Image: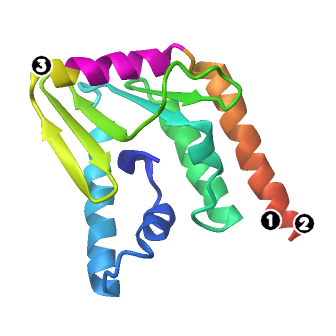
Amino acid sequence: MPGLLQTPEYIRGVQRSSQLTDGTLEKMIVARLRRQEVLYDRSRTFRFLITESVLRWRLVPAPMMATQLDKLVAMSRMPNITIGIVPLSSPMPELPTSSFVLFDRRLAIVEIPHAEITTSEVRDIELYEEKFESFSAVALSGTGMLELTEGIRDDFLREQETG
């Protein structure tokens, strides 16, 4: 789940094995939530791609997962944000190898398990732009994205209701 779209509960769930003290964790959550304010700057545009499997990973209890997916739905309705979901049923154009963030055509940050790699090399950025576009071609957006995300959210809510 992209950090800019995470709820406080989801952030806490992601960080639960990080060895952070409670105070440090709370400061980090506040900082991440403050960073999310950039999404409300209408002069900027954001395009997110998320695999369906990420929406289904149970990093937090079902009610919190439902809240996280509600946030995705709400953010997807903002005019400067596009969220695409790559469904499990789509033929994959290539192997999704890592998470990455592109900043215009100037910078790419690639997340690997133990570090982030930052590059401004044109060839590297083009590689990640091509990867992004290949997954965008099979992703659901708009109504399809909403239906898939809301369906998964409803599954979490039913799970909560039935125990």
- Mark 1: give few (<14), some (14-19) or many (20+) Cα within 10 Å: few
- Badge 2 vs badge 1, beta-carbon distance below 8 Å: yes
Q: In the figure, is residue 18 to the left or right of 107?
A: right
User: Is 51 part of what is drawn in magenta?
Assistant: no
Q: Amino acid at mark 1?
A: Gln
User: Is 134 part of what is drawn in magenta?
Assistant: yes
Which is more foreground, mark 2 or mark 3?
3
Residue 58 x %, y %: 63, 60
Judge whether 105 appears above or below 31 on screen.
Answer: above
Mark 2–mark 3 distance (CA, rounded to whole Å)? 52 Å
> Magenta part mainly helix, strand or loop?
helix
Residue drawn at x 62%, y 63% is: 64
Mark 2–mark 1 distance (CA, rounded to whole Å)? 6 Å
Q: Nearer the viewer, residue 80 or 16?
A: 16
Residue 120: assigned label: none
Which residue matches tag 3? 122
Residue 149 x %, y %: 66, 38
| Helix, strand or loop under label 1 | helix
Residue drawn at x 56%, y 53% is: 68
Residue 94 x %, y %: 49, 23
Q: Nearer the viewer, residue 36 or 106?
A: 106
Which residue matches tag 2? 162
Which is more foreground, mark 1 or mark 3?
3
Residue drawn at x 26%, y 74% is: 27
Magenta region: 126-137
Q: In the figure, is residue 124 to the left or right of 55?
A: left
Which residue matches tag 1? 160
